[in-house]
């Protein structure tokens, strides 16, 4: 417990108040991230409501599973290709 308290005190001594410019930059980045995530959630909700109200027939579960596996394999291949480029 004493060690944790001493680490907290040390962190408080090292930290300093950010400048107004740094604070505004952090605030802008946070706001843009929040706006992006909110917009993405809204778009997903609208698409979901559209699909549900259109009464589109659902594909069989095995087709969905195969599509998800294909997407996962494609993403893994892209990640491996990008990592290979960094090593050289």
Image (cartoon, rainbow, N blue to C red):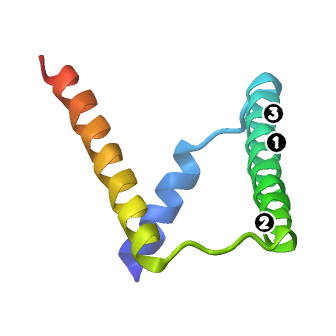
Q: Nearer the viewer, residue 56 or 2?
A: 56
Where residue 22 sits in the image (x, y, percent)? Answer: 73, 27
Residue holding disc 3: 28
Specify the farthest residue to the top.
88
Q: How far apart are marks 3 and 2 (CA)?
A: 34 Å
Mark 2 vs mark 1: give the one in front: 2
Horizontal side, residue 26 vs residue 4: left or right:
right
Q: How far apart are marks 2 and 1 (CA)?
A: 30 Å
Instruction: Please tell me in which quadrant of the rendered image residue 54 appears.
Output: bottom right
Query: Above or below — where is 88 with respect to 19?
Result: above
Q: Report which residue position mark 2 lands on.
A: 51
| Dot 2: element | helix
Residue most extreme to the front = 57
- Name the residue beneath numbered marker 1: 31
- Residue 40, given in percent of the width and then of the height, sits at 75, 50
Q: Where is residue 27 in the image (x, y as percent from the top left)?
A: 80, 38
Taking 3 as reference, is 46 above or below it?
A: above
Image quadrant where residue 36 sits = top right
């Amino acid at each position: 417990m004493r060690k944790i308290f001493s680490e907290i005190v040390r962190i408080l001594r090292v930290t300093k108040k950010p400048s107004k410019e740094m604070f505004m930059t952090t605030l802008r980045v946070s706001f843009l991230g929040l706006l992006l995530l909110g917009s993405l959630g809204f778009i997903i909700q609208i698409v979901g409501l559209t699909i549900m109200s259109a009464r589109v027939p659902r594909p069989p579960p095995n087709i969905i599973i195969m599509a998800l596996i294909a997407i996962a394999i494609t993403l893994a291949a892209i990640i491996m290709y990008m990592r290979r480029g960094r090593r050289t």
